[in-house]
Amino acid sequence: MTKVWDGFIRGFHWLLVVGITVLYFSGEEGWLDLHFVVGYLLLALMITRMIWGIIGSDTAKLSSLFHHPKHIFAALKSKFSYAGHNPAGSVMVLLFFVLVFTQLISGLMTTDDILMEGPLVTYISYELAEIAGDIHRLNIDILLVAIAIHIVAIMVYRVKGVNLIKPLLTGKNDIDTAAPRMRKGWVAYVIFLLLVAFILYVWGLEPLNALL
């Protein structure tokens, strides 16, 4: 068994799952203080992931997510174990990055005209805030569809004999290539905590105090 995922990438995956779940249900139930705080935490998490995609482990690199179309289609048929995301999975990862950032950034520019508004609303026109709100509501549905497709893909690969979940729990996988270079995941967690502190201090003290 070879280590293919560092501690931060594994944690990032499961924190993102929990964060999106809480974000969705808090939005549906109108728990806006929780919704905003979790949104800020996810924003810090996503920014950390982008930074780690530059300075992190080989399998965390953003450059490892871009592949030629022929390799993407070949990966759909293959049972080959990759050191990291396979080319087809990389497409889904990039899509998730776009959708999650769209959800978070549009949320920063969204207002309910009653109780709360995103921290960027004061810097944009009312018309743009309305557009951001429409995007925020539409994009979450697209994100949920993408998540459903992702779950189905995991099940299909499992039937084909490829377990995509286990490596994200253990960090290890059987691969036929050279072991990727790993970086210590705690470095990314330090970056994440610093970003959390900064974002909450700048934008999140009011909803955080309301929760506490």
Image (cartoon, grey):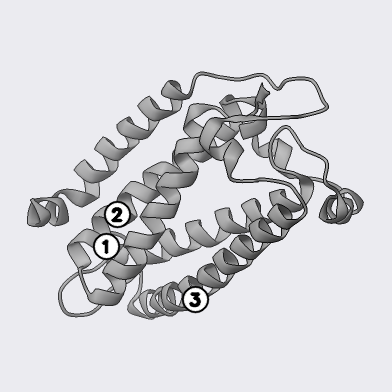
Nearer-N-terminus badge (3/1): 1
Nearer the observer, 142 or 127: 142
Q: Is residue 62 visible?
A: yes
Q: Is the Cβ of the residue at disc 1 closer than 8 Å to that at disc 2?
A: yes
Q: Where residue 210 appears, x then y in whole percent?
A: 8, 57
Instruction: Report whether 52 appears left or right of 68.
Output: left
Residue 127: image quadrant is bottom left
Q: Where residue 101 appears, x then y in whole percent?
A: 49, 56
What number is the disc on residue 141?
3
Q: Where residue 48 appears, x then y in whole percent?
A: 45, 37
Nearer the observer, 184 or 111: 184
Q: What residue is pinned by disc 2?
A: 38
Q: What residue is pinned by disc 1?
A: 35
Position of residue 56 relative to residue 31, above or below, is above
Q: Secondary structure at mark 3?
A: helix
At 70% from the left and 51% from the top, the residue drawn is: 89
